[in-house]
Amino acid sequence: MNAHDERGATMTGVEPDRLDDQQLMKELETIHRTRHDTLLYGSNGALRAHNERMAQLEGEYLRRNPNRPVAPGRTREGARERGAADTATPTTPGT
């Protein structure tokens, strides 16, 4: 893909639905690895392009994997249980 979207911004990269599963995972790993630097040091345009590409790739991953395993601790209920456990058992130094 090297076209202009409706706002005139240039987009690059292969359409996510044209990537095989291995290529999609590699693209996702790369974009997540570069996220922090783009946020801190990228121009507004670079950050916008990064956001759009990440949303495309993640959307494709979710489309292909609607029943992906979800770790209990990564849900709201799991987070609440973790928070309750953290406050339920105060520790005393030296015991």
Image (tube, helix red, strand yellow):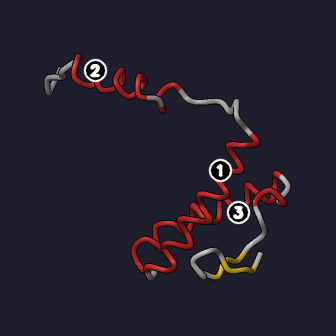
Q: Are marks 2 and 3 in contact (CB under 8 Å)?
A: no
Badge count: 3
Tag 3: Cα neighbours inside 10 Å, few (<14), some, or many (≥20)? Answer: many
User: In the displayed structure, does residue 87 sit left or right of residue 85?
Assistant: left
Q: Earlier in the sequence, mark 1 or mark 3?
A: 3
The residue lying toward the viewer, choosing from 46 and 33, is 46
Vertical placement of 46 versus 82: above or below? below
Which mark identifies residue 59?
1
Residue at x 62% of width, y 74% of height: 6
Q: How far apart in space, not on screen, are marks 2 and 3 (Cα)?
A: 37 Å
Residue at x 68% of width, y 80% of height: 4
Relative image position of residue 41 (x, y in whole percent)? 42, 80
Give the labeled residue for mark 2: 84
Q: Quadrant of the C terminus?
A: top left
Relative image position of residue 94 (x, y in whole percent)? 15, 25
> What secondary structure is marked by label 3?
helix
Q: How far apart in space, not on screen, are marks 1 and 3 (Cα)?
A: 13 Å
Q: Amino acid at mark 3?
A: Glu
Mark in front: 2 vs 1: 1
Vertical placement of 33 versus 91: above or below? below
User: Which quadrant of the figure has residue 69?
Assistant: top right
Q: Amino acid at mark 2?
A: Ala
Give the labeled residue for mark 3: 27
Residue extending furthest toward the front: 6
